[in-house]
Amino acid sequence: MPKTGQDDHARKGELPSTLQRSGQKAQDTFAKTYDAALEQYGDEERAARTAYASLKHTHEKVGDHWEEKEEYGPSDEHAEGGRDAQAGTAAGVDANASKRHLYEVAQRLGVEGRSYMTKKELVDAIKKANAAATRRARGS
């Protein structure tokens, strides 16, 4: 099912819940990429993976929604390596951002002990906080 409507914007009801709570640019990025990938590949799962990959170049997951990144680029080693990369994904966390940025995101999310964390520990803690925020937002 197409994610973009006649007005060339995302159809909110067709988007994953985290994107429904995100800004228009995040929604449109996902929807337009999804539609193009679905047309090209004919596979909904591959289209969704492609759309998330595109979204992660321009946005990062913060809590239960996506926010625009300061700089365009891959969010983690998996995104850098492409579809066949062996590295794990950071689940929307911009693991390539500076430690300072990650600290600020962790602070906004109320991550305890962030002052003593390494960059990798901050990424892991933000992933965990994001997952918890998404579960709360979905009521599960």
Image (cartoon, helix red, strand yellow):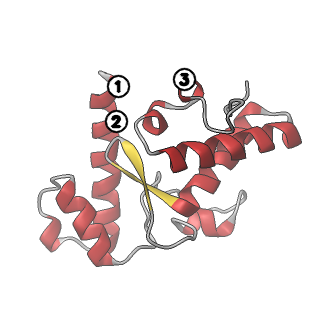
**Which residue has dot 3 on it?**
13
Q: Quadrant of the N terminus?
A: top right
Counting residues from the start of the chain, the first of labels 3 and 1 encountered is 3
Are discs 1 and 2 less than 8 Å apart at CB?
A: yes
Which type of secondary structure does the marked residue at label 2 adopt?
helix
Task: Write down the quadrant of residue 3 in the picture.
Answer: top right
Q: Is residue 55 visible?
A: yes
Frontmost residue, 112 versus 85:
112
Q: Tag 2 or tag 3, which sits nearer the N-term?
A: 3
Give the residue number, with chain letter if any, for mark 2.
134
Q: Position of residue 22 (x, y in %)?
A: 43, 42
| SS for dot 1 | helix
Query: Local crowd at mark 2 within 10 Å, few (<14), some, or many (≥20)?
Result: some
Identified at 14% across, 73% down, the residue is 116
Q: Which residue is mark 1?
A: 138
Instruction: Please state which amino acid type lies under the numbered disc 3.
Output: Gly
The alpha-carbon separation of the residues under discs 3 and 1 comes to: 14 Å
Q: Residue at x 36, y 78 (%)?
A: 98
